[in-house]
Image: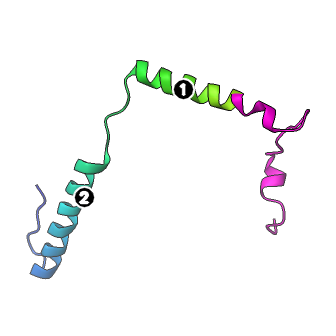
Amino acid sequence: MIDLTGLPEKAAEAVRTLVEALRKQAATSMPAPPSADDWRQLFDAYLREVAARAGCYPEGFVADDSRETIYEGRGE
């Protein structure tokens, strides 16, 4: 329960509108998390996908994901 005592009617209506929008969003956008077995299957499928891409890169390729490279040229 939200106490709207003392708020002007326009402000109270804005709060009601916001709360209703949040309720609708929560009811529609939060899927149930996968079970442990489902999560394991999804993770294993992801690992297979990653392994399948291994041949797409030149031999000896290593991604340079260092902080220096990521932020290079940003005026640090």
Q: Residue at point 83% right, 53% down? A: 69
Whether pointer 1 and pointer 2 mark residues with C-beta atoms closer than 8 Å, the reply is no
Q: Is residue 37 above or below residue 51?
A: above
Dot 2 lies on which element?
Answer: helix
Question: In this figure, which residue is indicated by the disc labeled 2?
Answer: 22
Instruction: Return the disc, 1 or 2, that comes first in the chain's sequence.
Output: 2
Q: Nearer the viewer, residue 74 or 47?
A: 47
Check the image and tell me how it is coloured.
rainbow
Q: Magenta region: which residues? A: 52-76
Q: Position of residue 27 (x, y in %)?
A: 22, 48
Q: Nearer the viewer, residue 25 or 74?
A: 25
Q: Amino acid at mark 2?
A: Leu
Determine which quarter of the picture holds residue 1.
Answer: bottom left
Mark sitting on residue 43: 1
Q: Is residue 13 above or below residue 27?
A: below
Q: Residue at point 56% right, 26% down? A: 45
Q: Is residue 11 above or below residue 29?
A: below
Mark sitting on residue 65: none
Is most of the magenta stretch helix, strand or loop?
loop
Q: Residue at point 11% right, 68% down? A: 4
27 sits to left or right of 39 = left
Dot 1 lies on which element?
Answer: helix
Q: Amino acid at mark 1?
A: Phe
- Number of residues whose C-alpha sits closer than 10 Å to that of mark 2, classed few (under 14), some (14–19) or many (20 or more): few
